[in-house]
Structures are given as C-alpha cells and as structure tokens.
Amino acid sequence: MDKITSIRGQVSVLDRDDVDTDQIMPKQFLKRVERTGFGEFLFFDWAKEDGWDLPRHPILVTGRNFGCGSSREHAPWGLQDYGFRAIVADSFADIFYSNCTKIGLLPVALPEEQRKAVAAADEAEVDLVDQVVRADGQEFPFEIDQDIRHRLLNGLDDIAMTLQSAVEIEAYEQERERSGPVTTAL
C-alpha cells in the first residue's frame, strides 16, 4: 500500500446521496478473483445513462451515506482502480469506510456546506498530515482515527501491521506449549 500524505488534483463530482455498494460495483462483477481491473465496471448501470460523465480525477466528491448497502471490498477496489485516491462525502457507511482505509483509499467526511464548496472547486487538496481539505482558498479540517491516520501515512495495510510484530509472534510460537504432534517441523 502506498503512503498517503497529501492528495492533490482535479475534482470529480457525483452529486448523489445514499450511493450503495451495489451501484458502485454491481454483483455480476464480483466473481473475479483479482483485486485489480474493477475500475471499468464502476457505476456500471449509471454509466449507461445519457449525459453520464465521471472523469478519472484523484478526488471524488459525493453526497451523504456513500458506500451504504452490502459489505463488498470490490466497491473500494473499483473506485481506486478507476483512479480515485480520496473520497469526500457528508458521511460514509462504516464498513465501506473501513474497507477504503485498508487499501489506501482516503475517505473524508465533511459537513454538507463544506463538501459542496469542495465540489464547486476545479481542484482540491486532501492533506492527511494537517487533516485539512483545501479548495478555492478555503480550508476545511476533518477528523480521522489516529490509528488509521498512522497506517495511511506509513502505507501499512493489515499484513504490514502484523509483520511489525513478527519478532514477538515468532517468540510466542517458539514458547507456547504444544499438545500433540509438531506440524511445523520439516
């Protein structure tokens, strides 16, 4: 996972509330075993609508309750594969938010007025170091769990976090009492 300090670039706007994971990544594309290549299926049904246009910019601004519905990792995978690196919304579904942070896709919750100001800007910056979104000369502070912030700033996914304790894990495995045959010896 790449480290995130600041994400700067043009803004794409999806001005819809209650966007669920079934719309973000429809069920027919969940059979794939790879974690990449989902971007082409993002908002598959909506992309067929006349006038649909969602540019591949680093920052997506959308409405409240983004990522609601079923828990599917494919939704954040598709958003990231499409090119988004940060999502600014009024609010997020809890599991979706967590799934985003586990792959290095930065979800930022801002109040509606601030979110609309970012949506109106051509470009913005989501600064994880200072915990602020900058757009059109304005700054909007945001909250983020400090453990999640640490993981994102340092590019640590769940496996990397576990590997930081490899010495302690190995020591535990060496010292723990085993009842039964040893299955790890060669």
Image (cartoon, rainbow, N blue to C red):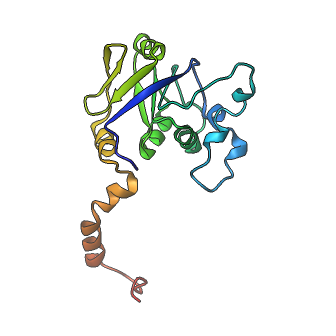
Tell whether 134 sits left or right of 30: left
- In the displayed orientation, state which residue is furthest to the bottom: 186
Residue at (34% x, 48% y) in the render: 155
Image position of 114 with respect to 84: above or below: above
Q: Where residue 144 sits in the image (x, y, percent)?
A: 32, 31
Image position of 165 with respect to 148: above or below: below
Q: Where residue 181 sits in the image (x, y, percent)?
A: 42, 87
Q: Where residue 123 sits in the image (x, y, percent)?
A: 43, 21
- In the displayed orientation, state which residue is furthest to the top: 113
Q: Where residue 51 sits in the image (x, y, percent)?
A: 70, 19
What number of labels is visible? 0
Tell whether 164 sits left or right of 9: left
Residue at (70% x, 34% y) in the render: 44
For residue 177, which quarter of the picture?
bottom left
Image position of 110 with respect to 95: above or below: above
- Of 19 and 119, nearer the camera is 119
Residue at (69% x, 52% y) in the render: 31
Which quadrant would the C terminus be assigned to in this image?
A: bottom left
- Of 118 and 173, nearer the camera is 118
For residue 106, which quarter of the picture?
top left
